[in-house]
Structure formats: structure tokens, C-alpha cells
Amino acid sequence: MSDNESRTGEEVPPDRLGAPQENLLDRLVSGVGSVAKADRVAYATGNDGRAWKNSRLLAELRRVNNGHVSARGRAELPGACQALAELFSESSSEYLIRAMLHRPEHLLGVVLPRLLDPQTVDGEKDGAEGRIPRTSEASALHVWSVFTVCVEVLWEHVSSKEGSAHRHLEPLAARTRFLALSEPFRHRPGDSNWEEYWRGDTLLHLFGDSDTTAPLIRRAREARDIWRGYLNRHQSLPLFDHASPLAIEEEIRWLAFQEGKSRWPFSGGPLALSAPDIEEEENESLEIAAPLPTAADKAVLVDVVERHLLPRFAVGATWSAVWGLYRRPRFHPALITYAVALFVLLIAIGALWRALHSEHGSITHSLLAIGIFYLVIGFGTLIHGRAWAMPLFLRIPAAGAVGLIVLVAFHPDWWKNVTWGWGLISALVVLGGVSFGYLLIEARNHNTGMISDRGWTPFVLAVRALSVTITGLVHSLFVAVVGMITLTTVFGEDNNLLREVWAGTSDLNVSPSAILTAATFWCLAAGVFSQILWDDQPITAPLSHRRWRDER
């Protein structure tokens, strides 16, 4: 905290030096970082000013920087880290730890840029040894590197026995640590800044003299696993539980997904925590290629989709995530299976429309297309696995079959009275309305947290519930067609009369489209409300009952 901030009580605007410091700065203040300072009392915030002026802290941070910018100072890096650890372990430094846990963005955006700026340190000139000009891209990388080492030492303290006084703030330390360590692995195609990170030797010697980036990669993977554990139980953490639902989703995206240029933020593919492929060209230049995601990287993405995106009814994000999973690093046959399923789906809907509204259509053709559609889904699930089937919401047709059983058991004459009119429309409004309302409430309850910070969040949740409802209507329509045409005509009474209705030879004053529409909305409502019996899982959960995990 600068003197000016102390006098005015206002935040000092951060110095934005470029990637990776600027990108990390944006992440720290977004997501759940927006509530990191919530409920702090005034005197605690005031103590932060003392922390940023702590002479021992500033001196050790300079030593860390010296270890990064010169081979001669590299030998001092372990000693500087040890000195930081000793400083954090002192009982008189508790205010220092709280400041860095609650306001890491101030350390990264204000303290370090000005501490390492040669224009503001001891009157030294630009270019002095160990000093990097603030306007260069290298300064952003070195500010990030000093911040990351400090955060790593802070995490080791908070997670140890000596840090028990701040154990309740351990999730904040885990978040900051993961975001800092994972920043060099985030990139966009053709990102020159990202390539420069890996061409230099700063990442090699981030934590000491090393010939590889293995120490950084190992810590980044460990940090991801720890932070993922906290996100999986974020409702147990009061500080995070009242964050915006979309803030939690930002953390989920940063946890498992690579950056992308697409407008769909979850379509970048798995975040690969591995060193890039570096090849030396004939002109002795280094060619940097993005690393392929490992099995663990892909598993984290799939786990995040199942645990977080599906229960939140994030239909668009789920499709984007699966698309990115199979699209990168190369086109996957799973996408071809999706295309085949979509093609057959359109044929089935077209054939059904033609059968109900044209004398030349045949209901048999629509039945055949629907059967092929679900065969393609079964084939895709069998070959490509549960991740491929996640966006299809296969619990809905399975639950809708429960409603079909009731339809078959209804009074045998129920369909004889179904024609288009206000009575049927009222029934459809009731069935569709209660189904949408139930899903809307479920969507809101699964998207925990406060929504006052973003006025459009309720609209997003309503769209999500509507998306699940529309998906359910398509599945329910197909279930109703199969059930009413193949099962009810066999097991129901007056089945000969019903066969004549579907064949178009009936003398009864009934509408086949009205019958199917009523059956569709009934199957939807029955499926939505009966899903509470399905192992207490949301209707968007994958179609499975057994999970080999420590928690449900």
C-alpha cells in the first residue's frame, strides 16, 4: 500500500505490465477473488498497509528477484525462500500473511512492479544489474516469477503446523498458488508471449538451479489437485459459498480448460500442465509447440464437466467442453459420431412431421429413424465412453419411460378424447409449466451463491433450465412415439382402433398429432419429477449408479 493509498483510503490502480503478470492479475480479482476481502473488518484492512511496507519482506523479495535475473544471484534463492518462511512463521507476522492471502493482487500489481522498478529503487538507473525496466515484457515475467515463489513459500507455511492460525484461509492460499503456477501453461494459438516464456531460462530456475522445468510442472499439478478438492466442496467454505454462481464457473474454467480464441470459453480443450515441445531449427532458432494434454489433464476436464457443469444445467458449456476435448489436438472420430446422430435426429423429426401432416408420410419411417438415432447414441457411448454421452442427458428418456408406463395403464379410452382445443392447450401449459418451473428451481439451487453482483445471472439460469426442458421435450417426443405406436397398440385395450389412428384409416374424430403431443408433455413431466428417485442425482447427471470415488 502506498502512502497515497494510506492517506485517501482508496485502492491504488495496479501496474499492468503485460503477460503473464497482467493475465494473472485479472484472474486474481475475478472469480471467487471478488469476495476474497468480504467481511473483513476495517482495522484488518488498515493493517495491510503495514504489510506492504515491511522492510524484511521487501528485502527478501529483492533477493528472490536477484536469483532470477542473474546466475550469480541464483545461489541466494534458497536462502531467500528460507528467510521468507522464517518471516511467515513469526507470530508477529500474522498481519502480513492475512494481507497476502486476502489481497494477492496488490502484491502482484502494485508492490512488486514498483519494488523491482529501477526508477523507484535507491535511485538506480535503468539497466542496473538485477533491475528490469517496467516497460519491457521481461519485467512482467520477472514480477510474476517473484510473486509465484512468494506464494509457494506462503502455501508451505499455511498448510504446515506452524500455519494453523490461518488454516481457515488455506483455500485462498491454494487458489492463489494454483493460478500463479499454472499461468505459464495457459496460451492461445500463436501467442508470442507464451513462446518467449519457454525460450528463456526463467522457468527453469524459478525455484532454484535446475536443468528442467520439472519442479514447476510437479508443483503446478499438485496445486491443481489441491485446488480441485476445494472447488469440489466449495459449499463447505463460507467464503466461497456466497460467491456468484458464475464466479465459481470462472474458477472451474481456469482449473481445467485451456485458453481459446472462440467465443465459447469452455471450448479450448484440456489445460495441459506439461512443458511444450521445443525443437531447434536449422537456423538455430527454437520452435515452440503446445504440449499434448495428458490422460490426467483430460480426466480433470471430464470430472469438472460431470461434477460442476452438468449439475448447473450449463448445456452450452458442456457441449463446448466436450467439443474442445475431442477437437484438440486433432479431429476425433467422436465428432463424426455426433454429426451422424444430428443428421439422423433431423431425419427422424422430419419423417414424423411428414407422417402427421402429409398423406404421403409413413409413421413407420419415423419409428425407424428414431430407432437408428438411439442406436447411434448407444454406439457412440459404447465406443467413446461416458464423456461423449454427457451432453445428451440420457437420464431424461430413461425417466420419461416411467411416464409411458402410466400412459399404457391409463383408462383405455383416454386417447379417444384428445383433440386440439383449449382443453388440450391448457393441459400442455400446465405440464410444460410445472416441468420448466421444477427445472428452474433445481438450476438455481445447484448454482449456489449470491447473484446480486450480476443482474443478468437469473436470465442465464432461466435459459439453462429452458435448454434442459427443450432437450427433454425432444427425448420425450421420441419416447412417446415409440410407446404409443409400438407398445400401446399391443398392450393397451382397443389396440385395433389405435392402430387405425396411426395408419390414417380411423373413422374416429381424433388427431394423431394431439395424442402424441399430450403423451410427450406427460412423459416430460413424469420424467422430470420421477428423477428424484434416481440415486438422488440431477436429471442432467450421466446415466450411471456406481462411482468409485471417496465422496458422492
Image (tube, helix red, strand yellow):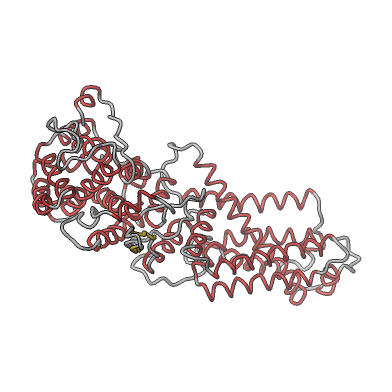
Q: Nearer the viewer, residue 117 or 260?
A: 117
Q: Position of residue 87 (x, y in %)?
A: 9, 45
Give percent across and percent down for residue 45. 22, 33
Direction top: furthest residue: 7
- Residue located at (66% from left, 70% from top): 373
Q: Measured along the vertical axis of the image, is residue 118 above or below residue 277?
A: above
Quadrant the C terminus occupies: bottom left
Work out whether 296 lies above or below 424: below
Looking at the image, which residue sits at the far front?
283
Residue found at x 52% / y 72%: 384
Numbered label tally: 0
User: Where is the N terminus found, in terms of image quarters?
Assistant: top left
Asked which quadrant contains residue 398, the reply is bottom right
Q: Position of residue 89 (x, y in %)?
A: 10, 48
State left or right for residue 51 relative to residue 27: left
Percent across and percent down for residue 61 are 15, 43
Going 63% across and 55% down the picture, which residue do you hit?
Answer: 470
**Going by the image, does 170 lie left or right of 242?**
left
Looking at the image, residue 378 lies above or below residue 57: below
